[in-house]
Structures are given as structure tokens and as C-alpha cells.
Image (cartoon, rainbow, N blue to C red):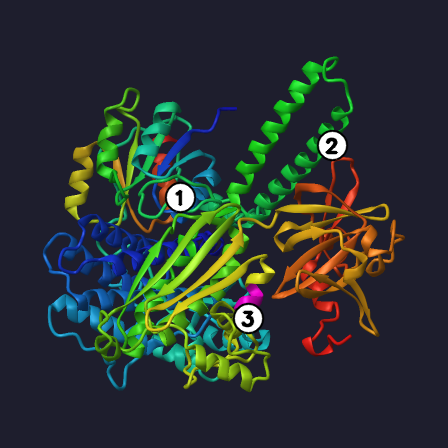
Amino acid sequence: MTIDMSQFYQVFFDEADELLAEMEKLLLALDVSAPDSEDLNAIFRAAHSIKGGAATFGFADITEVTHVLESLLDRIRKGEMALTAEHVDAFLASKDVLAMLMNGHRHGEAVDHDAVLSVSKRLNALQEGGPVAAAPAAAAPRPEAEPAEKHAPMADADGNFHFRIELPAVSQKDVDALAAELGLMGALTRDALSDQRAVFNLATSESQETIVAICAFVLDPDALTITSTGPSAPAAAPDYGLYEQVQQAQPAADAAAPEPVAKAEAAAASVGETRNYGRRATDKEGGNGESSSIRVSVEKVDQLINLVGELVITQAMIDQRIGALDPLLHERLMNSANQLARNTRDLQEAVMSIRMMPMDYVFSRFPRMVRDLAGKLGKKVEFVTRGAATELDKGLIERIVDPLTHLVRNSVDHGVEMPEKRRAAGKNEAGRLILSAAHQGGNIVIEVTDDGGGLDRERILAKARQNGLPVSDTMPDADVWQLIFAPGFSTAEVVTDVSGRGVGMDVVKRNITAMGGVVDIRSVPGSGTTISISLPLTLAILDGMLIKVGEEIYILPLGYVIESLQPASVDVKEIAGQGKVVKVREEYLQLIPLWQIFAIEPKSADPSQGILVILESEGKKAALLVDSLVGQQQVVVKNLESNFRKVAGISGATILGDGGVSLILDVAALLRSSRQLNADTMCF
Amino acid sequence: MTTAKTILTVDDSGSLRQMLSFTLKDAGYSVIEAVDGNDGLEKARSQTVDLVLTDQNMPGMDGLSFIRALRGMKNYKSVPILMLTTESGDDMKAQGRAAGASGWLVKPFDPARLTEVVRKLIG
């Protein structure tokens, strides 16, 4: 082909990713005894599409696997072959192999040829209806990259075979050396893939083995991807046909054939346009079939959100200026301003919802993981998801994947007991793992629930004491469970490669807190455990409390604020070398004078003349001293780093209705750096 | 200067649509893309099209059904319709002809061949 195909690869890879994911999801949901015919059709079409695309781009290794997969699926969907669990396992294994081959072409990752061969054998055995051999043959010859259809690696008119050789990332010197060697074998042309790796097209009468042997001098032959391309038309049949002889449409159109070829070559040189292979802005609803969507780059969406944020701020300014006018005199202006406020609010909601994606994006990766993990551990786990359509901001979804994965693995590994133990306890042999998501107020609540053995209170207390953490036997359960979030904490008896190294839970909690969320644990011994994560729906808007110190107004995220009060002088005490503390009900809390931290001239340094805002973060409480409370409002968060630079103690900024800039306090950092008191030092 | 002829491409695969568009635009045609049979009919209804290129294997309405439906529409009785198919067997060719296609092209397609055939049909 005269046109450089590599610019289209990315779109094909993205499409193939989705098709493979769809295929896996459908395969996992198939009821082997009564498979849904629509699902079978969809799985068949997915394999067919991948085959078509792979053939177009010359990825013969992928074409080969998908070809057998497709014909098996075709026979099954037509009722010519019965679906068995054997088939489903083989298809899932094929999906893994296809993903691996895809990555081989995409990133130059090494390909496990034994796995490819093993899967091919399984699929072929199923084709013949014989028993499936799961183990690969001992001395496996490297599979020839031959698409099984009409594209057999036939020699062309001169007796030459055509090969396409993709090199891994090696030095230019090595590429040149190889080019020189291979060039001796026949006609060689060089090209580059989208990630700068070199690719050769070689026409030679030698065989693929010879090519591999030569390359082995310079690099690891396993890192190569060789596909045989060839005259794309099969020997006998033509590649197109017209049912009727066509009259030339225009008298001027003559000798049209040579023209397109010349044009196409010129076109390859003129492609300067960069294609924007952005991500899709909205995901398809799970299982709803057709829903149209467009791919939009994340940058464009973020810019849109930014501009709407600016609009909200400007509209707030207008509101403020209008507030000073006589409503009777300017009635129509007021009405229009109110209308504008409503329109802006609606626009903001609509735009924020663009970045919202259904939780299914996260949930969908778990069924396979749970199935494989449970199988590996010899446990039986039924995996259920609820509320997969619940939406969350894309940025947060990406950040919740790792923590959730850790929690799910924990549940399977440590929560759910072995089948014998469950039977003995009178439970179902198969444990139940429920992953759920639901909106609650301005938050999303995600829960991981298992009906396993629950947390062992005594073991946790013992481990905590061992680690030197302050605990008491009368601690309420909820506080005991929170201990497992301490760094280095793990009561697992055996460290498996799945979990138990004790580095997981504290990272989980830290990640969730960094997202502005909280984690709670409920557990009943013998019955099970529920881990509950609450996250704000988005990070771009924030409910804030406006506070004033001197002439400056700051914002406190409402999520950290417990209450505010004016202390009595008698409740404020000074501790030598540690600053002031204040007695709130029965607790003594560190008093943080904001004016001191930011070096501002306050209205009054006397706590009893100001206001204390009681804050809580990461389990610690403190009292922030400010001059006064100004109010509460929703603010649009502006990133300080991208406009200025990172400032300690400040997590962002916003523009208030009067046009002034207000900084948003990083409460977690503030509390962390303030000196913490131990119960021991409370002696006066 | 004559305005460019318009080609409607119907294929559920984004990467294939991209390649078709690129090849045809480069040959000087204007291209309208449709993601499936229904979308194709919509677009054919609302715009003037000089040639139609359709895939066969699509979810919902397959290529043959789309061609039949299109031929039933006013203005589309004689517009050239090319079917893109992975099957080169006589069976598919006959079905295509019966449905009303003007010709067929094998997938994966050679851009030069595609342009040549399109030129033959609409210049």
C-alpha cells in the first residue's frame, strides 16, 4: 500500500481495546447452558471487527488468532456447535493473547509466543471437536505469521516473499546494521512506526527463519514482530467487481487508473494535520445497545470547564454590583440578572456532567480479576455490582481504581473464607462480594462488602500495641477498625503475592483523603466486613466557609469544618514551648492562630475576641483562630500552581463576587504541621 | 470549478471510516461518514450523495438490508452503491447484486484500487 498506515494505528488500537473489553464482559456474563443469542452475535461481531482491522493494517498474527476465534463463534451463534465452559475459558485466554499481541505492535512489548501457540492449539482443538490440550508442545517452532484466509504468504511473480519486520527500540547503529544485512537478501525499504521504532519491508526469496537468524546477531529475536505481507489479492480472484459495465461518467475522465496512484503517493507526503485521538467524552450506557457519542480530547473538556468557571465568577460579580441597586427602579435589570444566574447554574451543571463517567468504567475490570484470584486461592466468590451507572468525575474515577482494587483483593484474600470453613460455619460455600456505588448528597458512596469472617478485633489491638500505637481495650469498634490504616500494619499471617505486605491500607486511606474523601469500616465477626468510601462528586467546585483575618478573606473547605465557636478566656491555656490550647467540651485542642501562620495583622490576637473554627483532618482535630466568619458559598476552584506556583498551606484559589482573589486553605497540611499534643503532656 | 462529488461511507469501525475518508478526500471527493445502517439512511435522506460505500457486517442493520432500504428511497434508485466485504465468495456477490448494489470491493481494501473503482463509477 502506498499510503502510510501508521497514522491510523492509534484509532484501531483504541477501538480494539474497547472491542476486547466488550468481548470479555459478555463472555463472563454468558450462561453456558442457555447463552443469549444477541450476546453471542455481539461477541462474534467484536472478533470479526478486530480481524478486519488487523488484516487491513497487516497485523497477521492478530488476524490468525481472530480468524479461528471468529469461525468458532460463528458456528456457535448459528447453533452448529454447542457452547461449553471449555469454549468460554479458551475465548477468555484468546482475549488475553490478543491484548498481548496488540501491545506488541503498539509498544514493542515482548510477546510470549508459547502462549500464542497454546491458545491457537486450544482453539483449533475445539474446531475439531476433540479434547482440548491445555499445555503447549515442547519444542514449539515459532508460529508462521500466516493469515488463514486468502492472504497466504505466496511468492509473487518473481518468486519473492514479502515480510514486514517491526524492530524493538534499539540504537540507530543496530538498525543500520540490520538494514545492511537484510538488504543483502533482497529489496528492503525502511519506515518508522508512530513511536519511532523502525520497521522494514523486505521482499526476498529467503524464508522467515533466515531473517530471524540474521537478526539474532544483533538483537533478541523474540523482540521482533515479523508478519508476512504479500500481494494482498489472492492468486485467482479479483479484489473488486462491478455488476454492469459503466459508461464513463464524464467525457473528461480518461485513463483514471494511473492517476489515483500518483495522487495517493503525493498525499502521503502532505499529511501535516495532527489527528486528535482524544478520549470519548461520554461512555456508552452498560448494555443499552446503540448510543451515539463523540470522542473529545480531555484538554478540550477541561478548557470548557475552565471557561464556564470564569463565567460563573463574572456572573457572581454582576450579582454583587446589582445587589446595591434599588430593586424597584431597576426591576427589569434584576429580572434579567436572575435569569442569567439560572442559565449560568444550568450551564455549569451540564458542563460538569461532561466529565462524569459511570462507575461501570471501574467496576467492569473486577469480575475477571475476582474470578481469576478466587480460582487461584481455591475459594468460591460470587461477585455482584450495584449502581454501576452512578457517575463520578473522570479524574476521580482514575484515582479510585487503585484503592478499590486493593480493597477488593483484600476481601477475596483475607475476608472470604475457604469453602470448607464456610460450610462448617453454616454459610454458603461461595462467598459474596458486593461492590456498590450511590449518590448521597453532594457525594458518592462506594462500598466493598463481603460476607466473610469479618475483622478480628483482638488481633488488630495486639498488632497495634506491638507497633506502639496508643490503644485501649475499651476503644469502640469503629476506632479499632481505623487502626488498620496505620502505616506498616498488617495482621495477615502469610504474605501472599496478592496482599499482606502491610503497605496497602495506609496508601489507600491517604489516596482517598487526598481526593477529599473519607473511609469508614463496619465489621461483624463471622458475618463480614463493609468498607465505605465517600468522595465529593467533583474537585472543581467546592462548598466553602469564608473566614476573615485582618483584611484578608480565606476559604475553608466545608468538609473539614466541624463547628465554630467563640471561646471563653478561661478555656484557653498556654503550654510552655507548645503554644496555646483550647478546651472544647472535654477535649483540649491545639489552637492554630491563622494570623500568625500567614503573618497578617489581625483584628485581635485574643482568642476570646475572635472565632474558633474546629477542624478535623486525618483523625486529628484542631481549632483555627480567625477574626470573623463572612459566610458560606460554593466556589469555583482555580488551580494556583498552573497560574502562579505551589504555595505551602494553600490548595487553590477562587475569585469572589467582589472581584477579589481568595485563597483556599489546605487544611490537611495545616493540621499536619501544627504541633500535635500527646495525652501525656496535659499536666497543669 | 466543479464542486467535488460527495461519497457516503457507512461502517461501524471508526478506524476503517477514517481510512476511507482519508483515501477518498485525497482523491478529491467530499466524504460524509455514517456509523451504521440507520445513520446512513438518515444522512442519505438529508443530503445529496453521488456514491455510497457500505460495510456488510454491522450491528443492527447489516449492509445488504441497508442497500435494500436505500434503493427504496427517492433519489437513490440509481446512485452507485459499493459493498465492502471480507467474503469474496459468489454467494455474497449474488446477494449484493440482488439487494441492489452496483459492485463490490474486497476488505481489506487497497486505497489505489478503491479510488480507481470510484473514479470509474462517478469520475
Mark 1 crowdedness (10 Å alpha carbons): few <14, some 14-19, many ≥20? many
Mark 3 crowdedness (10 Å alpha carbons): few <14, some 14-19, many ≥20? some
Q: Quadrant of residue A310?
A: top right
Q: Which of B106 and A300 is in front in this view?
A: A300
Provide the secondary structure element on which disc 2 rests. helix
Residue A144 is labelled as none
Q: Is residue A44 above or below residue A244?
A: below
Q: Are marks 2 and 3 in contact (CB under 8 Å)?
A: no
Q: Nearer the viewer, residue A349 or A461?
A: A461
Q: Earlier in the sequence, mark 2 or mark 3?
A: 2
Residue A119 in sight from this viewpoint: yes
Disc 2 target residue: A317
Measuring 67% from the left and 34% from the top, which residue is drawn there? A311
Provide the secondary structure element on which disc 3 rests. helix
Instruction: Return the x and y of residue A464 as percentages of the image width and height.
Output: 53, 81
Specify the segment rendered in magenta: A507-511
Callout 2: residue from which chain? A
Residue A193 in sight from this viewpoint: no
Instruction: Return the x and y of residue A333 as percentages of the image width and height.
Output: 70, 17
- The C terminus of chain A: image quadrant: bottom right
Same chain assignment for discs 2 and 3: yes
In screen coordinates, is A207 left or right of A126?
A: right
Instruction: Return the x and y of residue A1 as percentages of the image width and height.
Output: 41, 54
Disc 3 target residue: A507
Q: Is the magenta stretch mostly helix, strand or loop?
A: helix
Residue B17 is labelled as 1
Q: Is residue A250 above or below residue A461?
A: above
Q: Nearer the viewer, mark 3 or mark 1?
A: 3
Q: In this view, does A506 lie above or below A3?
A: below
Q: For the residue marked with disc 2, what is the amino acid?
A: Met
Q: In this view, does A374 lie above or below A13?
A: below
